[in-house]
Amino acid sequence: MAMTFIRSNAYRLHIDTKHVAALGFSAGGHLCGTLGTLYDAPEVADIASPDTIRPDALVLCYPVSASYGRTHGESFDNLCGEDQALKDRLSLDRLVRRDMMPVFLWHTRTDDSVPADGTMRLATALAEKDVPFSLHVFAAGRHGLATADDLVYRRDNLPLVSDGVMDWPELAVRFLWEQGFHIHDGE
């Protein structure tokens, strides 16, 4: 519904309907990942046309992306209950398709809530399907960093992170630029 709203209000929002990216963190990263893979699934067919729902790029930040192995099992339990077949179906690495949009991924190796393993499996699946992607796994940083700076945390309580973690927004913008997303200044 959000994608439909964005595209149907493109003129008022001053956006290019051909350059709409979905960005999500943690479980929201999984949600955006499913939006980028299941936009034409029967479960969403009544909402709008696939072209309206499909994002043109994904930015997935420390996503809950795999339902097996070292993962955040509670997220999949909350989403699917005890339904193992549904958990298997919604593992992002198993949903990757050749016609996917470009994907920017970042995670930290020391995330003790959502292990980076799933993100790396997702990157491998993207590579196997020849989907454009950029993967950044930073050495240190806890879960839930967002921008990891004083926009999110008090100055006296900034989290310990590796050099470069705070650069992920700029890295994502550069990646999107390389994929044909261009910032327009209202012209």
Image (tube, rainbow, N blue to C red):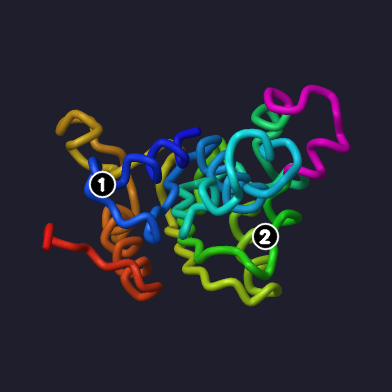
Q: Which residues are magenta?
A: 77-90
N-terminal of the pair, mark 2 or mark 1, is: 1
Q: Quadrant of residue 89?
A: top right
- For residue 163: magenta? no
Q: Is residue 160 left or right of residue 1?
A: left
Q: What residue did someone put label 2 on?
A: 121
132, above or below 51, in the image: below
Say which element carries label 2: helix
**Which residue shows up at 67% across the image and 37% down it?**
44
66, above or below 128, in the image: above
**Which residue shows up at 45% across the image and 35% down it?**
2
- For residue 87: magenta? yes
Disc 2: CA contacts within 10 A as few (<14), some (14-19) or many (>=20):
some
Q: Is residue 96 left or right of residue 164?
A: right
Q: Is residue 152 left or right of residue 50?
A: left
Front one among 159 and 2: 2
Residue type at the position of mark 2: Arg
Disc 1: CA contacts within 10 A as few (<14), some (14-19) or many (>=20):
few
**Which residue shows up at 55% across the image and 35% down it?**
27
Residue type at the position of mark 1: Tyr
Front one among 50 and 182: 50
Marks 2 and 1, how far apart at CA: 38 Å
Q: Position of residue 86 (x, y in %)?
A: 82, 36
137, above or below 108, in the image: below
Front one among 105 and 113: 105
Report the magenta stretch's main SS.
helix
Say which element carries label 1: helix
Image quarter hosting the C terminus: bottom left
How many discs mark residues in the rendered view? 2
Q: Is residue 83 left or right of residue 180?
A: right
Q: Position of residue 21 (x, y in %)?
A: 41, 53
Q: What residue did someone put label 1 on?
A: 11
